[in-house]
Image: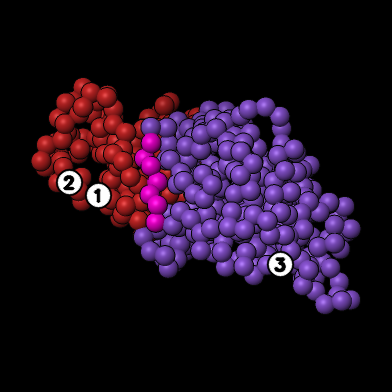
Chain colours: A purple, B red
Amino acid sequence: MRKIRTYHQVEHDTGSGILEQVLEQRARIARRLASVRAIVAVLSGKGGVGKSAVTANLAAALAQRGARVGALDADLNGPSLGRMLGVSGQRLGDGESGVVPAAGAAGVRVVSMELLQDAADAPLRWRGPSGDAFVWQGLAEAGTLREFFSDIAWGDLDVLLVDVPPGTDRIARLLDLVRPHVALLVTTPAEIARFVVAKSARLLREAGLDGIGIVANMTGRLETGAADGARALADETGIAIWADIPFDARLAVCTDRGEPWVLASPDAPASRAFDALAERLLNTLPAGSP
Amino acid sequence: MKFLCVGCDRVMTFAERQIPGDGTLAAVFVCDACGREIAMLTNPMETQLVSSLGVKIGGRTVPEQPLEQTRTNLEGGRADAFEGEARLTPGSVQWDAGAVERLQRVPPFVRGMVKRIYADWAAEHDIAMITPAVMDRARAELGLEGM
């Protein structure tokens, strides 16, 4: 049998420069994010726990404290952050150094797939052979997420919030692209949420992330005697609860129509909880200007 | 991915890329030692797989444009998603009526990006007026698919 050299034994590339192109993609992200003081991922792994509402209200609370804030909606299939920050229908700028994000509530700079699609009810679809889309559509989505980091002219930011869709695979995808300074694990008192979010906590821990905090969302509604999944998660993982956001139906109604609750009703208990979270976050971030 | 000329034990180098427009791709590699050529042919799924990685077999001919992969591959892109004229190379490259008409056939979602690519290419080649023929040359040289 002939001995054919292996890939690694062949030193010279074919001239396609595929590796160099991939490295350049990474370098573009690094260059762009050099002007961002901290990336804060808002994630859970579980759906329906209020990640986007937490992101929108936290973004507004940070901006109210004078921080320069960007909000990246990483939920390409179910974007809602743009709507919650009031940028639906806005156009993105085709700027000199990249695509200029939309200006949302409290001046938060926003990008969302919603702003790129031609209809509000349009499902995310990619050009290409449809019969085997499952083979490549994950790569296409990862490519768009990469471009949201590298090609949006975010400018100087203190915080870039990333609203991460459900699924631990989506968290892993994010970690492949960037390393957040802080990951906020959003959960609810529901036991089933704890069960899923624990997987995300383990993923973040195994990735070596230090700055992890739990956001206990929609608290205060359990009947006496029911287990509190958020507190159980904190006990089980050793991750501290950074915020306890009491349930308030008005928060959802208001935020859903594009006005973060922290702006509409700054003295409400939930708004004060977001403000406290914003303060804690700002005290946690690396010092200095981006 | 590398191609090895087994007889010469030499890695083959990229020579040419062709995009026939049916979703397939042909990339030619040559052995610098013996001159043997091979063509790698990809089916539409394989072509899309490579495209989804955001890389170009044979290397990039123009710098990656902002949101290039998203704008190129998204189905149902919003026509007025972007405002403001795309940045063009200083030097005011002109467009004749035929080129303008052809540019208008490009979907609005990607038109700004495509216009910038052609204008940059024309400026690099000291071409003051972009015509359909110039666009054809640029398209062939740059390997622009669907632009």
> For residue A90: magenta?
yes
Find numbered disc 1 in the image and state the secondary structure of the residue it sits on: loop
Pair 2/3: label in front: 3
Find numbered disc 3 in the image and state the secondary structure of the residue it sits on: loop
Q: What range is drawn magenta here?
A: A89-95
| Image-based side of A216 in relation to B22, left or right | right
User: Is residue A14 something that shows in the picture?
Assistant: no
Where does the C terminus of chain A fall, quadrant-wise? top right
- In the rendered image of this protein, does residue A89 appear above or below residue B15? below
Mark 1 and mark 3 on one chain:
no
At label 2, which amino acid type do we have? Answer: Arg
List x then y, in percent, for residue A153. Answer: 47, 37
Q: Nearer the viewer, residue A221 or A95?
A: A221
- Residue at the spot of label 3: A247
Q: Gap between marks 1 and 3, in whole Å?
A: 49 Å
Q: Nearer the viewer, residue A113 or A246?
A: A246
- Residue at the spot of label 2: B102
